[in-house]
Image (cartoon, grey):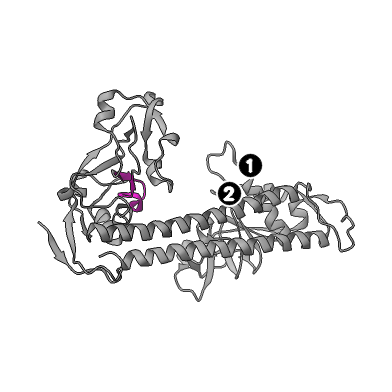
Amino acid sequence: MTEHINTPELRFPEFKDIWYIKQLEEIGAFKNGINKDKNSFGHGFPFVNLNNVFSSDNINIDNLGLIDSIKKERDEYNLLKGDTLFIRSSVKPSGVGLTKVVQNNLTDTIYSGFLIRFREQKNFLEDNFKPYIFSSISTRRQIISLSSTSANTNINQDSLKKVKITIPTLREQAKIGNFFSKLDRQIELEEKKLELLEQQKKGYMQKIFSQELRFKDENGNEYPNWKNESLGDIAKITMGQSPSSKNYTEDSNYTILVQGNADLNNGYIKPRIYTKQVTKLAEVNDILLTVRAPVGKIGKAQLKACIGRGVCAIKGDNFIYYFLELFDLQNKWIKFVQGSTFESISGNEIKNIDIAYPSNEERQKISEFFSKLDELLKNQLLKVEQLKTRKNGLLQKMFV
């Protein structure tokens, strides 16, 4: 039965038709994927797994894993253009029911038991509209409310059948789908620009800190050779100490507490909790380094903060900050934590890290160079975030 309701807040002006509600069981059929034992993997025929749906890339037969399957299975669990794969089980509630629309017929390909295939039996949905109607706020809320939680968050076919979607005519769907597809391509393009900037920065860091690339003074002369130092000899390192939990508070009149990586965002403190008891203090512009899992993540203190035992504060210049950033990018912390039951590093291990240290003038030039790159990265990240915010706002306004 078709139920008529109001139209969305924002739509293309040439469309006036009422949108209508359909339950998914009215327009298509669901089928769970196939479960296989571990010996079946790595050879045979293409296989779509959970990660292929979580990925931002389209499902492409050329980059799928392989699994043993017989013809009967490949016929029963096949994937055709327009099929939608729902994630059946996820560690996080936000992951359950996420979808990926199959863009082409996938020959001899089957899909995982952690996925559910939805195949239209009547032509109610345009393929390019499906990713957006299934990610709309209304659909996502229904999926999460219909899911169950144990160790993971799960949803089954019977629950998905109950999901209601509000849809316009096929012609309007096609226009909406094209609009959001173009916006997604724009986001993808800006994300690639951001990725290239990140790769460029890493490349420069490797060349500069290995001294393959050196700066010169204003007269074109070489700066003095870099001196080999220990980090503890050129910077003051303060290991954190956690205050008693009874002193934790949400009152922002008290001191911010930084306990680990969860309290850092894009290289700066992200206030989450405060403390009435100040044990160890990080001053403004101190470098913050995580010393417990995950080890080696860094940030800058843009304000005073109490530091817990998962963090240390380093009084050092920007050169040291970029040195530690590269140290993490090159995965050098792993030699300190290998074999440990719990990933952590000590104050002495940090102090004894070897660092080649240039003259003050060359350090200044290196810091300025990377600061400019960071500004470009910051602006590009902002551009990506603004586009994503715009998309989310439009998803709210252009769907019921």
| Residue at image point 63% right, 44% down | 333
Left or right: 277 as drawn, with respect to 42: right
CB-based contact (under 8 Å), mark 2 and mark 1: yes
Q: Is residue 94 magenta?
A: yes
For the magenta stretch, what is the residue range? 84-101
Q: Is residue 302 magenta?
A: no
Q: Residues within 10 Å of mark 2 (few under 14, many from 20)?
A: many
Q: Residue furthest left?
A: 1
Q: Which amino acid, mark 2? A: Val
Q: Determine whether the residue tagged by mark 1 lies in a helix, strand or loop.
A: helix
Answer above or below: position of 156 versus 174.
above
> Where, quadrant-wise, is the C terminus in this rendering?
bottom left
Q: Which residue is mark 2?
A: 295
Quadrant in the picture for residue 217: bottom right
Answer above or below: position of 244 versus 48.
below
Visible residue check, residue 310: no
| Residue at image point 64% right, 44% down | 330
Q: Which amino acid, mark 1? A: Phe
The image position of residue 357, as x and y in percent, is 79, 53
Front-most of 192 and 209?
Answer: 192
Q: Residue furthest bottom?
A: 253
Per the rendering, the mark at residue 336 is: 1
The image position of residue 87, as x and y in percent, is 32, 45
Q: Residue furthest front?
A: 14
| Residue at image point 18% right, 47% down | 122
Front-most of 271 and 52?
Answer: 52
Mark toward the start of the polypeptide (2 vs 1): 2
Q: Determine whether the residue tagged by mark 2 lies in a helix, strand or loop.
A: loop
